[in-house]
Image (tube, rainbow, N blue to C red):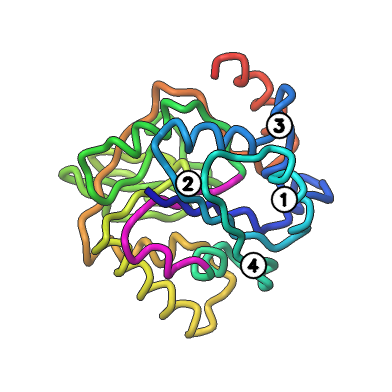
Amino acid sequence: MRAILLAAGRGRRIGRDAPKCLISIEGRTLLERHLVNLAESGVTDLTIVVGFRREMIEDALASLRPSLRVELIDNPRFVHGSIVSLHAASDRLSGGGLWMDADVLYPAALLRRLVTSPHENCLLVDASSEETGEEMMVGVRAGRVLKIARRVGKGWDVAGESVGFAKVGAQGGRVMQRLLEEEVSAGRLDQEYEAAMDRAFGEVPFGVERVDDLPWTEIDFEEDVEKARRLASSL
């Protein structure tokens, strides 16, 4: 199985001069934790989309010596939205696989839940999260994802925060590849990749796996680093 790790952004809101995947939590960087969890989940090939301070990620990989086959793909337009990063590696989706935001702390069990899901196309959703306008929220009805946006409102069978990890089969991967190309070719570079996903839901079915019971956090702000440190002992 192939995974794409989106690690190109600068993370201005956290005020660090390094890629966020190199943030160390209790002595291990997010990147190192990703590599271990991916290998344990059966992923054999990893594409890391890089941009800001690529050389720092290269140096980290050289010291970690991962067991997976790892390639780096440049996103020189990393100052734009994440849609440009996923688009840079979109040809890797034609056979299916995973894509993941790199700024997430999580246990191996969370990733295994995605990999082993019976849904060919699947998102991880935490239904215990409240909608504030900051998080990417998912709306599910009759077991199918129909909406992903900063705000999805009420009235869903399940509504919750997207972890930022997705799995697609070959058909879903090809649909995403086409939609990413359409969005980027149209010059809509400052969107998140969820804009293409929202369109994909109308073409192929996406299911969800809930992770309300598992500790995880996306790291956008300094307070998220503190939360990650509190969670790390339970991973």
Magenta part of the protein: which range? 89-102
**Mark 3: which amino acid?**
Val
Q: Which of the marked residues, 2 or 4, is nearer the chain's N terminus?
A: 4
**Which callout, 3 or 2, points at the residue further toward the start of the chain?**
2
Badge 3 or badge 4: first in the primary sequence? 4
Q: Residue at x 42, y 70 (%)?
A: 91
Number of numbered discs present?
4
Alpha carbon distance from label 1 to label 2: 20 Å
For the residues labelled 2 and 4, the Cα–Cα distance comes to 20 Å
Which residue position holds label 2?
164
Residue type at mark 2: give it.
Answer: Gly
Chain-order first, disc 3 or disc 1: 1
Q: Secondary structure at mark 2?
A: strand
The residue singled out by tag 4 in the image is 74
Say which quarter of the image contains residue 94. bottom left
For the residue carrying disc 3, how many other residues have a C-alpha within 10 Å: few (<14), some (14-19), or many (20+)?
A: some
In the depicted structure, whether residue 163 falls above or below residue 8: above
Residue name at image x 59 percent, y 71 percent: 190
> Alpha carbon of mark 1 to alpha carbon of mark 4: how far?
12 Å
Locate residue 75, reporting x and y percent: 63, 68
Whether residue 209 appears in magenta in the rendering, the answer is no
Left or right: residue 202 compared with residue 61:
left
Query: Which circle marks residue 57 in the picture?
Result: 1
